[in-house]
């Protein structure tokens, strides 16, 4: 009798449990691998594999459009989607149409994840590439397709965004490409969309963050939680999230990150600092930013910002030394016309050493062509010496640069190593500051008031 009663109770409870935990449909679209050189793999394989595995375990139905010209990469792609298309504009549109059709069978509370894992382009003011490839209108964010001269505009994903909004489907867009901060516009277009990017709109991105984010995704965790966890573990790039707290933290730390951005758009953790981004600001702008930054570090973080001003001065000095070295090197590679032949300025720094090296080349490589070339140089020995004497008298830079030896250039290398160490410390501080500011915001965390699609999106 006891067994019968327990069976009845379990039977009655089963539908209640299922009703409380509805099974939602989950779909993923992956676009990536474009613009890679020939070879069996791509730089995106590890992040593709990490995301693919996580999506599969979490029960997502995946649609993939990826560069199909790499043998080993294809194995990963096929393990995720056996009907994957090549990542051309045509192939991407085909997959988008397939996903759009699939969304019509889905409803409120279901999920769509879009993962972009390819090379990206900075924001453009005009056309790019050959005239036939020039975009007809200003793109949202151009990424590189399978052909490195073919660019796909992520604005075409708005078709899925509109469909998801109409059906009440949760949408998350994760863009790990360079300059992916441009994709935050998806959230501007529809506040129901959660957007995570590996970089800001003016900096390069790194697949390291994409892989770290994938590994941080845990069942039941929100995308917001996973993003914050991954951001603390990855020091490359400037990962961003579309929440109000994320946008505000990024704005508050603008002065810090402006010290770290390089001319080429290099992000935190790699490349070299470019303090000129800071130095070119107006005095009023610098003072107001510095005041705001001091208040942030002292009140929100309990840190003294004075050390950062001293560090900035060090960065400026190192940057100037590096720029001077580049200028000196360029000076040495200028060409001079001497006796009808072309010679580099650096060959005149020490004429005897230069001619001795030439004579050794004659012994080591006695081909007919080399002999003729070297004899021609030796025939101009007196003219080379005369030109050097002239430069000593007329160009003050010549002797200064000529006296530079390997030790001097070694010192610059040593100083650049110091620069990299400073950069790493800056990156670590930026991660700490961002995380603390973000978590201190009033609407962060479970149970807080306020709509937040990144917090509400449970993986």
Image: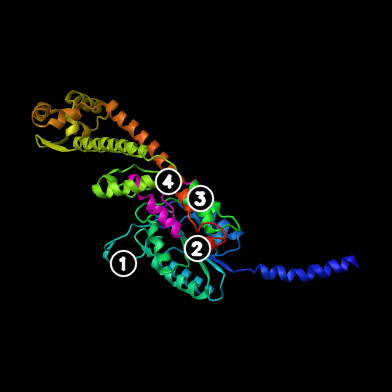
Mark 3 and mark 4: span between their CA atoms? 26 Å
Q: Which residue is mark 4?
A: 299
Percent x, y for residue 280? 24, 47
Between marks 3 and 1 in the image, the one whose residue lies nearer the viewer: 3
Which label belongs to residue 452? 2
Camera-side mark, 2 or 1: 2
Which numbered dot is residue 230? 3
Helix, strand or loop for disc 1: loop
Query: Whole-percent x and y of residue 335?
Result: 16, 38
Question: Considering only vertical position in the picture, is 235 above or below 221?
Answer: above
- Membership of 309 in magenta stretch: no
Mark 2 nearby-residue class (10 Å; few <14, some 14–19, many ≥20): many
Specify which label sits upstream in the sequence, 3 or 4. 3
Q: Residue at x 36, y 43 (%)?
A: 271
The answer to whether the residues at label 2 and label 4 have Cβ atoms under 8 Å apart is no
Horizontal side of 50 relative to 328 (left or right) equals: right
Is residue 232 visible in the rendered image? The answer is yes
The nearer-to-camera label among 3 and 4 is 4
Between 47 and 343, the residue placed more toward the observer is: 47
The residue indicated by pointer 1 is 138
Which mark's residue is nearer the viewer, 3 or 2?
2
Mark 2: secondary structure: loop
In this view of the protein, can residue 375 be seen by the observer? no
Left or right relative to 186: residue 326: left
Q: How many marks?
A: 4
Q: Earlier in the sequence, mark 2 or mark 4?
A: 4
Q: Is residue 27 above or below residue 368?
A: below
Instruction: Give the magenta range.
Output: 233-261
């Amino acid at each position: 009798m006891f067994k019968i009663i327990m069976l009845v109770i379990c039977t009655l409870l089963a539908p209640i449990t299922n009703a409380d935990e509805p099974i939602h449909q989950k779909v993923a679209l992956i676009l990536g691998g474009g613009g890679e050189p020939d070879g069996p793999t791509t730089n995106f394989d590890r992040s593709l594999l990490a995301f693919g595995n996580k999506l599969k375990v979490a029960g997502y139905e995946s649609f993939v459009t990826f560069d199909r010209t790499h043998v080993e990469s294809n194995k990963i792609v096929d393990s995720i989607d056996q009907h994957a298309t090549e990542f051309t504009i045509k192939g991407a549109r085909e997959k988008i149409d397939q996903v759009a059709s699939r969304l019509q069978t889905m409803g409120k509370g279901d999920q769509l994840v879009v993962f972009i894992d390819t090379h990206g382009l900075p924001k453009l003011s005009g056309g790019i590439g050959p005239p036939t490839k020039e975009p007809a209108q200003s793109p949202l964010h151009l990424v590189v397709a399978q052909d490195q001269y073919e660019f796909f505009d992520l604005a075409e994903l708005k078709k899925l965004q509109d469909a998801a909004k109409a059906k009440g489907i949760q949408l998350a867009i994760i863009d790990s490409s360079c300059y992916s901060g441009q994709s935050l516009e998806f959230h501007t277009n529809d506040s129901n969309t959660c957007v995570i990017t590996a970089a800001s709109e003016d900096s390069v991105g790194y697949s390291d963050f994409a892989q770290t984010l994938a590994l941080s995704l845990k069942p039941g965790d929100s995308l917001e939680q996973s993003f914050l966890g991954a951001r603390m573990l990855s020091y490359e790039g400037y990962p961003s999230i579309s929440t109000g707290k994320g946008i505000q933290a990024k704005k508050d730390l603008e002065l810090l990150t402006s010290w770290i951005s390089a001319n080429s758009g290099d992000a935190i953790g790699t490349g070299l600092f470019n303090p000129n981004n800071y130095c070119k600001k107006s005095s009023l702008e610098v003072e107001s930013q510095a005041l705001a930054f001091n208040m942030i570090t002292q009140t929100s973080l309990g840190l003294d910002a004075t050390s950062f001003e001293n560090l900035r001065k060090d960065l400026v000095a190192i940057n100037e030394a590096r720029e001077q070295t580049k200028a000196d090197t360029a000076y040495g590679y200028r060409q001079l016309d001497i006796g009808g032949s072309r010679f580099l300025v650096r060959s005149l720094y020490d004429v005897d050493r230069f001619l001795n090296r030439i004579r050794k080349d004659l012994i080591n490589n006695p081909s007919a062509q080399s002999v003729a070339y070297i004899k021609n140089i030796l025939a101009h020995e007196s003219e080379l010496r005369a030109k050097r004497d002239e430069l000593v008298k007329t160009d003050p830079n010549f002797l200064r640069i000529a006296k530079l030896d390997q030790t001097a250039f070694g010192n610059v290398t040593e100083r650049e190593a110091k620069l990299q160490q400073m950069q790493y410390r800056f990156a670590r501080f930026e991660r700490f500051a961002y995380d603390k500011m973000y978590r201190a915001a009033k609407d962060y965390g479970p149970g807080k008031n306020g709509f937040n699609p990144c917090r509400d999106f449970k993986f």
